[in-house]
Image (cartoon, helix red, strand yellow):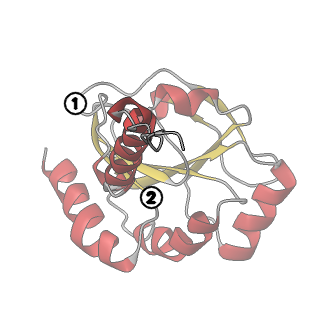
Amino acid sequence: MSDTAAPVPKRRSWLAFLPLALFAALVVVFVVGLRGDPQRLPSALIGRPAPQFDLAPLDGIDRPGFRRADLAGHVTVVNVFASWCIPCHEEHPFLMELAKDGRIRLAGINQKDQPDNARRFLGRNGNPYALVGVDPAGRAVIDWGVYGVPETFIVGRDGTILFKHVGPITAQVLAAVIRPEVEKALAR
């Protein structure tokens, strides 16, 4: 008989668990980040003049295009929308209601949309916009700092961006956020 000792199991080094620990930390960071409120995305444009733009009109509707010069002298609510955007369909009745306020002007930027689809969208649901500019490549909205559709801006009479709302306008958002911000803009 030999006097052989049983093999000693190798101890796992803590280094073997390092990749798993790093992965778990990243998951926590992403989960916490995703729980943030997209309404609170900061906009570097608040308090600054609206960017330069000159957007062609949407063919087949009786509204002019939309350009930077159109902002002068009016409190303007600028809404970025698209027919393919489900939240845009949900917010549309509230834009129709907002458009009834004769003290402001509602302007739309139709982003990355097919003209036929945009015309059908506005024809079926009503057109709240006094001006509709088409941004087929989505380049103009980049200058506005748009993350996605829908987004809405309130622009003062002097062309300064005063407020930005990310996401759809709901009844609650219209009453508690948009209308008070419009009143502030009108009082300036």
Mark 2 or 1, nearer chain start: 1
Q: Which mark is residue 47?
A: 1
- Toward the top, the furthest residue is 52
Q: x, y (%) of residue 37? A: 31, 56
Q: x, y (%) of residue 98? A: 41, 68
- Toward the right, the furthest residue is 116
Question: Callout 2: 10 Å neighbours few (<14), some, many (20+)?
Answer: some
Q: Is residue 77 visible to us here? A: no
Closest to the observer, 37 or 29:
29
Using the rendered view, name the quadrant where residue 179 is placed: bottom left
What residue is shown with label 2?
167
Helix, strand, or loop for circle 2?
Answer: loop
Q: x, y (%) of residue 181? A: 22, 56
Q: Is residue 123 visible to us here? A: yes
Q: Which mark is residue 25?
A: none
Query: Residue shown at 80%/65% (left/top)?
Result: 120
Query: Residue shown at 31%/77% (left/top)?
Result: 172
Closest to the observer, 39 or 92:
39
Query: Residue shown at 37%/53% (left/top)?
Result: 38
Q: x, y (%) of residue 46? A: 26, 34
Question: Callout 1: 10 Å neighbours few (<14), some, many (20+)?
Answer: some
Closest to the observer, 104 or 124:
124
Amino acid type, label 2: Gly
Closest to the observer, 182 or 5:
5
Q: Is residue 172 above or below residue 181?
A: below
Helix, strand, or loop for circle 1?
Answer: loop
For the residues labelled 2 and 1, say whether their Cβ atoms are less than 8 Å apart. Answer: no
Using the rendered view, name the quadrant where residue 182 is placed: bottom left
